[in-house]
Image: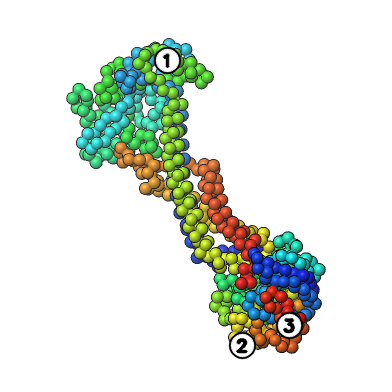
Amino acid sequence: MIKINSLYKKFNRSVVLKDINLHIKLGETVVLKGVSGSGKTTLLSLIGGLDRPTQGSLLIDGEPIHKLPDNFASKLRASKIGMVFQHFNLLEHLSVAENVMIPLIPTGLKVDKIQDRVNSVLKLTHIAHKKDTLASRLSGGEKQRTAIARALVAEPQIILCDEPTANLDKANSLLFIETLQRLHQQGKTMVIATHDPLFDNLPFSSRVIPMVDGEIVDE
Amino acid sequence: MLNNSFFYFLTLQLYKEKSKHIAVVLLSLVVIFLLSSVLFISSSLRYSLFETLEAQPDFVVTKLKAGEPSTTPIDWADELLEIYGISKVTPRVHGRYFFKSKDKSFLVVGVDFLEEQSHKGIESLISGTDIKSFLSGDNMIVGEGVKKFLEKNYYRNSYQFLTPKGVFKKVNIVSTLTDKSNLLANDMMIMPQALAQEILGYGQDEVTDIAFNVVNPDEWQNINDKVLELHYDLRIVSKDEIKKLYQNLYNYKGGLFLSLFIVLLLTFSLILYQRYNMIYSTERRNIGLLRAVGWSINDILKLKFLETISLVLISFILGVTLAYIYTFIFDAPLLKEIFLGAENLENSVAFRPVVEMGVLSSIFFIYAIPFIASVLIPVWRVAITDAKEAML
């Protein structure tokens, strides 16, 4: 599903990622572990096609996302990848339902179809009761569930999570892990970048990959 | 279109961030309103003046004394008539009469009602006046400004002129010109030519100038040269020269307002720039988020373009409509004084509604292009460089 070969990323003179080689299979859950600055977020942004590697290749379902023009990379991202961010990144002036529909807007789907999809994903993530609430009025846990709903609404095969529990308390973090487990059962491929110890022994994670100074140290 | 997700999201964005958008619309509205009002007034005045100039004779001849215009002998009219190609020769009497105590003046215009050519130029002004009763005594028709001024100074139905011979001459006011003619005739007093000659101190054989037309416009230069040969102290002015004089005046005023507008536009751009810088970090993150969830750079630019063009259109339509109402219904208070300058007499000019499509499209492009650019360029820069902003 995701194939990364000899991948490097440099910012000016500093090398942020060094010789990354990683193959992630369909339905796998991979946890990228490491302290802040170890390169986890950069690796996620490369997998998501938000940035381009300096060297090496990155294939998503056989497609070289790092070489695709913006329009195609965006389409690939919209159809195959869902992202959950550390700061949730919701548009604060929009409601929960409106935030969740954002990934479907450029797809050309009709509004009523989009609303049907949003309603079903809100039920799945247990946030349907807050559908019309403004994002700015949600708690941390509710924001996270909204962010997950947004990541799932386009029915992507891959879910990328960047420090998903960094702004959650323990109870909400555990709830989040439960949601991930359900997604794993549905066969989603997940890559989670985190330094939260709660992810050390996930019953459903196939691999924990430690990263130090931009390198995978021991897979 | 209502079921189109893009337009649905666009209306959501416009509605949900209404306070931000209302602020932008209000700011733009002020700029559009000012610019439109100035251009509407300028077009209206230009249109009215040039229409009047178009009705003027092709040439005007005056006698010079020590290089200054002086009274012109009426005999020159006969000499002009002898030149082949000249028609409609009209001796004219006009001049300013000063109301010393108030430091004001009136424009006295003498009309020979028996000569068709003489009153043709002001035909439209005096239409509806009973010429017979007008000629039966010492009567005059006055502009609205003159009427108001005289009434304020207790002259209701007549006015006592003091002639250069030191004799008082009572002239009755038989009617007042309509306010539509105020731009040109606000301070005008129209009277029989002989009466005007007496009041201005002209002899029976003296006039202010002599106007004439030339049948073939190709002969203008030839005729001009022939007329100049008649007398060494003769000055000839063509309609084109008068037009150029007014054009220069309008170019000067237009240039002045253009300079003011550039200053206004720069201020406006600066405010917009500051405004967008203020929200830059949030905006950057939001754009990064849109990219992260699958929006392409084109999708983001399309959304921002439609958002901005909606605001531009709303501001433009409202601004132009308000400017139209302000200029043509309320007669542009404040701006009118700037345009017409210090008036000799109080003037209630009614601007003639003139809307030129060229002017409207100029306003739109002068305003819309910098505005759209000031929004889209930063958005585009963020969209191409900071897609991973959402990850931070």
Residue at 53% across / 65% down in the picture?
B279
Instruction: Report the disc number at residue B227.
Output: 1
User: Does residue A65 appear to the left or right of B215 in the view shown?
Assistant: right
Label 2: chain letter: A
Element under disc 3: strand
Say which residue label 2 marks: A170
If you read the primary sequence from the N terminus, does the residue marked by circle 3 or circle 2 appear first?
Answer: 2
B37 shown above or below A132:
above
Label 2 secondary element:
helix
User: Is B6 situated left or right of B137 in this image?
Assistant: right
Which amino acid, mark 3?
A: Val
Label 3 and label 2: CA atoms lie apart by 20 Å
Q: How is the image coloured?
A: rainbow
Whether callout 3 and callout 1 share a subunit is answered no
Position in image of residue B213 (x %, y %): 45, 20
- The foreground one among B354 and A40 is A40
The residue carrying pointer 3 sits among few (fewer than 14), some (14 to 19) or many (20 or more) residues within 10 Å by Cα, namely: many
Residue at position x 52%, y 52% in the image: B316
